[in-house]
Amino acid sequence: MKAITSRDNAGYKAMAKLVASTAERKRRALSVLEGAHLVAAFLDSGRELDSLMVSRSALERAEVAALADRAHPAAVTVISDALFDALSTLDSATGVIAAAPTPEGVAVPANASLVVLLEDVQDPGNVGTLLRSAAAVGAGHVMLSKTCAFAWSLKVIRAGVGAHFALNIVEDADLAAWLAAFRGKSVALAGGAKESIYDLDLTGPLAIIVGNEGAGVSESLMRAATKRARIPMPGRMESLNAGVAGSVALFEALRQRQSSADKRG
Amino acid sequence: MKAITSRDNAGYKAMAKLVASTAERKRRALSVLEGAHLVAAFLDSGRELDSLMVSRSALERAEVAALADRAHPAAVTVISDALFDALSTLDSATGVIAAAPTPEGVAVPANASLVVLLEDVQDPGNVGTLLRSAAAVGAGHVMLSKTCAFAWSLKVIRAGVGAHFALNIVEDADLAAWLAAFRGKSVALAGGAKESIYDLDLTGPLAIIVGNEGAGVSESLMRAATKRARIPMPGRMESLNAGVAGSVALFEALRQRQSSADKRG
């Protein structure tokens, strides 16, 4: 374990550059994880960190010391609290920040059980929330169109709370092309649809499509889907938050699957 | 309709003070609404604006001109685009900002059909999302404990997208005291609970309790509830976003109610 006290240290400067620049993170294929929970979620996925910096005072916490022990010794650096504060992306410094290889997405099989498709979802909080819900229901794959918020941005990673490392995340995906090969049902969420998600059989291989916060799913992607469905809103609202809409649909799919498994069992 | 071009105008200064200061909004019992959609949602609720300021260029849009027509003429002021930009709370100025009397919450009846209780929900986005979902399912009432984010803050109003005016919102509520008098079921959402929300009968008068983002529902409020229930998460996540968790429970209650209404009908 190294210890550094100068902001001119090459490792420190490299981390600061990663924190500051999305382009740098993309170029080096690294993501920045701040906080013990995110770093632990990454290590739980069986991958190795590129580097881990912990503040001197954070290292006194058993949770943080244990994390530092789990990383490769050469990857760990202890820095002063002042240096950490200068690096931190959060209001209350957590004392733990890491650079981790950004996992590459792999092709989603045409018979996948549950896939989430995001088309032009712009808000990082919504993308992160949808990743979190997808991981929670056990969907294995999330595909994002080119115009979605960057899935590995600091904000999306923060909102994902570790979901990123429990999923296969495919960015810049051609959603319509993938749907054409998919051998399951696909449901585009659309406020104006006639059928409700509660009217549909959501068991079996399923893709759920969530669209842009303002415009919803595009007409062309709607046509590529086998169904369009609304989430019923008897109250006086025109629409739901996109993160909520996708999550409600995912949990309804989960409910139906658990209920049909109960009946079979 | 007045027109002003100077930032020394008393009406303009009063609006700027409202935008800048939560304390001022609380003191005058006014909320700030930015954007045509929010202002329309407020007017749709049958109430009168305190004041409405529109930028000269926004007034050229039919939607905005129609809004200005719906407000009391004495309450409407046209301001220059530069003055509007200085006032705006958003990155892209909408050209429409209003001060509206903050509706006062009224006592929630002990036999209410569907009530949402928020305990120490801190994130303004989560509070706004939960209000939006509550309004969407047609829950009439949302009660917030003293330590929740202020329901009428700019961020919460923005995330609510008009839900505020379709609900009875009661802040600084003593949730345990209200539950003691409630003549329905109350379900505290808790990750570690044995029963799943899908195992429960959520028809009839119901209160759904959502807790703090980190700590969940407090033990004392858990004890005041008739049930605690989890949202099942077969995937590798420890928890859901609080806004999502509450929304999934609300929509499950809606699904059960619609399904039992179908059976009766």
Image (tube, coloured by chain):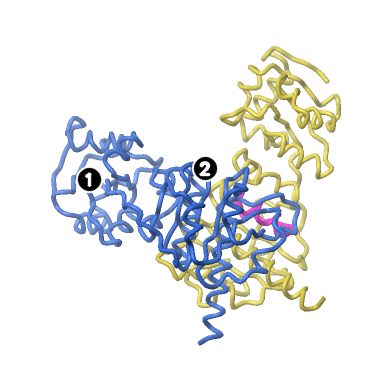
Chain colours: A yellow, B blue
Say which residue label 1 marks.
B56
Segment colored magenta: A127-146
- Which type of secondary structure does the marked residue at label 1 adopt? loop
* Image quarter hosting the N terminus of chain A: top right
Amino acid at pointer 1: Arg
Count neighbours of disc 1 (C-alpha within 10 A) and say few if under 14, some if 14 to 19, many if 20 or more: some
* Image quarter hosting the C terminus of chain A: bottom right
Q: Earlier in the sequence, mark 2 or mark 1?
A: 1
Question: Does the magenta-highlighted stretch encompass residue A138?
Answer: yes
Please give the name of the residue rendered at 61% of the width and 31% of the height, measured from the top-left corner: A21
Q: Nearer the viewer, residue A211 or A68?
A: A68
Which mark is on residue B122?
A: 2
Q: Describe residue A35's horizontal placement relative to residue A236 as left or right.
A: right
- Which type of secondary structure does the marked residue at label 2 adopt? loop
Q: Chain of mark 1?
A: B
Question: Does the magenta-highlighted stretch encompass residue A38?
Answer: no
Q: Chain of mark 2?
A: B
**Residue A162, quarter of picture:** top right
Residue A27: x percent and y percent? 69, 35
Q: CA distance from mark 2 to mark 1?
A: 37 Å
Q: Describe residue A43's horizontal placement relative to residue A212 as left or right.
A: right
Q: Judge whether residue A147 can be spotted in this image.
A: no
